[in-house]
Amino acid sequence: MGIEQYGDIENGEANGLEDLEKPFIEKKKVFDSEEERETRREKGSIGMVLLSTAVAVCGSFEFGSCVGYSAPTQSAIREDLHLSLAEYSMFGSILTIGAMIGAITSGRVSDSIGRKGAMRISAVSCITGWLAVYFSMGALFLDVGRFLTGYGVGIFSFLVPVFIAEIAPKNLRGGLTTLNQLMIVSGSSIAFSMGTIITWRTLALTGLLPCIALLIGLFFIPESPRWLAKVGKEKEFEAALHKLRGGKDAYVSREAAEIQAYIETLKGLPKAQIKDLFDRKYIRSVTIGVGLMVLQQFGGINGIGFYASETFVAAGLSSGNIGTLAYAIIQVPIITIIGAILMDKSGRRPLLMVSASGTFIGCFLTATSFFLKGQSLLLGWVPILAVSGVLIYIASFSIGMGAVPWVIMSEIFPIHVKGVAGSLVVLVNWLGAWAVSYTFNFLMSWSSTGTFLFYSAFCALTVLFVARVVPETKGKTLEEIQDSINTETRIK
């Protein structure tokens, strides 16, 4: 935080008499240029940014825990509570119904009470839901609990990437926002793994832990500076920005000025409504956000993820546990080692296209395995192709299609419409998730081959959509992204 401003004594160097021979005019300059101070700020302390991100992604971990809960518990819950296939499908998919309602309210809630206040509401809703699942003795309490956890993760799914994008320096924003998806798949993977060795009631209790960690952590992190600036809390805005950039001596003047200037341009604008999103100046951002979420979901992720264990059994494995564990293990290293690194290296668009191509291959291999089984051909290869296809699918999804749409969603909307636009985009995402998760079992009963061919078609369509419509946002501030989108809209 500006140590370089001081002399060589601060750097531990002792100068001799030879310094007296140097011309007086060549003395070290006292003032740094704007660019040098900006560079130093970006390289400064990010401890509070990392802590704030770590607290926020507890919500992402909770998201993953909820999504991963239904796959390993399907047979045990159906047996213990005597549920039909339709009743369990309702239990699995009602999470997404709650999430849709959470998505509808997420923007308004986070805009009115702040990002931290909205995260508290989400955590309390999830805690209540998990307790209802734990104590349930029939379908009703089970569904109510699942609905409440869905409402909580619906808010988290919008709020966490937005919060991280608003607190992170532009050079770290992509990588840090990727942690959202990392923690989602981590929560899902751990739920998958633990569900094979502990009871479904005990697994429900583990869902309480990330919520408790988040509630405690919120006491130690600042509110989003951009939200504070938006609601006119000037002192809190400056204090939060200093805290996030290394303390009261951190250089934040340039960043604060950019944020304030952007906020000032928005003050004269009317409060955004859903209908405003179809104005010409926002329609491209809406098309990008909604399009990516539709393609993400109709690529089949929630059907494959919610019912992975039964899919492996249908393909011919004697037990779904082996495939489920492999599914759980492969998500985390892929997204950790590759996805987070490439987010700010290769850029958003290349990562999306590579990821969507991989999910196409995975779905096509799985469809091929079920086709061979139906025709009684190469039966020894059927389980291998099915497991390989699903694992290729989830690895490819985790590297890009899981994380990047949420990152882009958090970047492309102006702050005055971010609440209502984010709610619309997340609502579309969860509507697609409900449609896929509820129909998956019925589609598999109709045609396993047809189900995965259907998903593969959407994966192929994703590549074309990204190539033609989605902009690159790597290395740009949120304000620069808006200028770029608005310029392209005016040109078109």
Image (tube, helix red, strand yellow):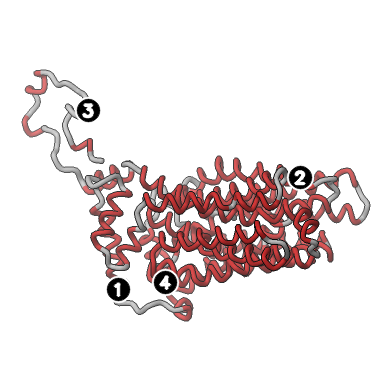
The image position of residue 445, as x and y in percent, is 83, 63
Sequence-earlier tag: 1 or 3: 3
Q: How far separated are the C-alphas under marks 1 and 4?
A: 12 Å
Tag 2: residue type?
Asn
Establish if 346 lies above or below 465: above
Residue 374: name its quadrant.
bottom right
Tag 1: residue type?
Lys
Q: Do the numbered discs 1 and 3 sit on residues whose CB atoms are within 8 Å?
A: no
The image position of residue 317, as x and y in percent, is 83, 46
For label 4, the crowd category at 10 Å Cα-Cα, with few meaning under 14, some 14 to 19 and many 20 or more, is many
Tag 4: residue type?
Val
Instruction: Return the mark for residue 417.
Output: 4
Q: How far separated are the C-alphas under marks 1 and 3?
A: 46 Å
Q: Do the numbered discs 4 and 2 sit on residues whose CB atoms are within 8 Å?
A: no
Residue 484: name its quadrant.
bottom left
* Residue behind mark 2: 321
* Residue behind mark 1: 267
The image position of residue 55, as x and y in percent, is 45, 50
Establish if 120 lies above or below 242: below
Q: Is residue 450 left or right of residue 471?
A: right
Marks 2, 1: nearer the viewer: 2
* Residue behind mark 3: 11
Sequence-earlier tag: 3 or 2: 3
Give the structural element (helix, strand or loop) at label 1.
helix
Q: Do the numbered discs 2 and 1 sit on residues whose CB atoms are within 8 Å?
A: no
Establish if 195 lies above or below 116: above
Q: Is residue 487 left or right of residue 15?
A: right
Sequence-earlier tag: 1 or 4: 1
Residue 291: name its quadrant.
bottom right
